[in-house]
Image: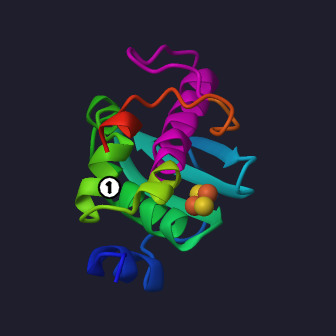
Amino acid sequence: MIYSEKVMDHFMNPRNVGAIDDASGVGTVGNAKCGDIMKVYLKINEGVIEDAKFKTFGCGAAIATSSMATELVKGKTIEEALKITNKAVMEALDGLPPVKVHCSCLAEEAVHAALWDYAEKNGIVIEGLEKPATDIGEHDHHHDIEEE
Ligand code: FES
């Protein structure tokens, strides 16, 4: 079996599926190569992510990483959430096969895109947050990939 039990669990029973109607920030990212699209909704109150939901049109690993990423950012401050990299998401899932690493990048970037949207809507700057790309395949700026 190439997928860990945790990946299978989050694929079969994804957490936080859906939308947040009064979301503080919404981010959508995709990967033109595989055609997968991920949308993340965050509800932020006084700098804390109170709720996170997602809709993913994509592969099983994209669903599992969205599920895990939303689980990991819930209850975290914005600052803490920024430290949750695709690598951290993969580790929490006990790993992904190399061809599926990009799926976890989609999850990281979707969270960043939602934070970016939140910052723009509130006219604030989140330190350490770069404007996320909408197509993750275009530039693989994730250094983590090399290390895998
Ligand atoms: Fe592209 Fe999974 S195959 S996100």
Q: Position of residue 46 (x, y in %)?
A: 35, 33
Q: Residue at x 39, y 55 (%)?
A: 69
Check the image and report above or below for 32 versus 47: below
The secondary structure type at the circle numbered 1 is helix
- Near mark 1 (Cα within 10 A), the count class, few <14, some 14-19 or many ≥20, is many
Check the image and report above or below for 142 versus 95: above
The residue under label 1 is 90
Q: Colour scheme in the image?
A: rainbow
Given the image, on which type of amino acid does mark 1 rest?
Met
**Numbered range of the magenta stretch:** 104-132
Task: Assign ligand 1 to one image quadrant.
Answer: bottom right
Q: Residue at x 70, y 56 (%)?
A: 34
Q: Position of residue 99 (x, y in %)?
A: 49, 57
**Can residue 115 be found in the magenta stretch?**
yes
Q: Is residue 81 left or right of residue 67?
A: left
Q: Position of residue 72 (x, y in %)?
A: 30, 54
Q: Nearer the viewer, residue 115 or 108?
A: 108
Q: Nearer the viewer, residue 7 or 54?
A: 7
Task: Look at the image and tell me whether residue 30 can be seen.
Answer: yes
Dividing the picture into quarters, in which one does residue 98 lie?
Answer: bottom left
Q: Position of residue 146 (x, y in %)?
A: 37, 35
Check the image and report above or below for 43 versus 142: below
- Disc 1 under 8 Å from ligand 1? The reply is no
**Can residue 94 be found in the magenta stretch?**
no
Q: Is residue 31 left or right of residue 7?
A: right
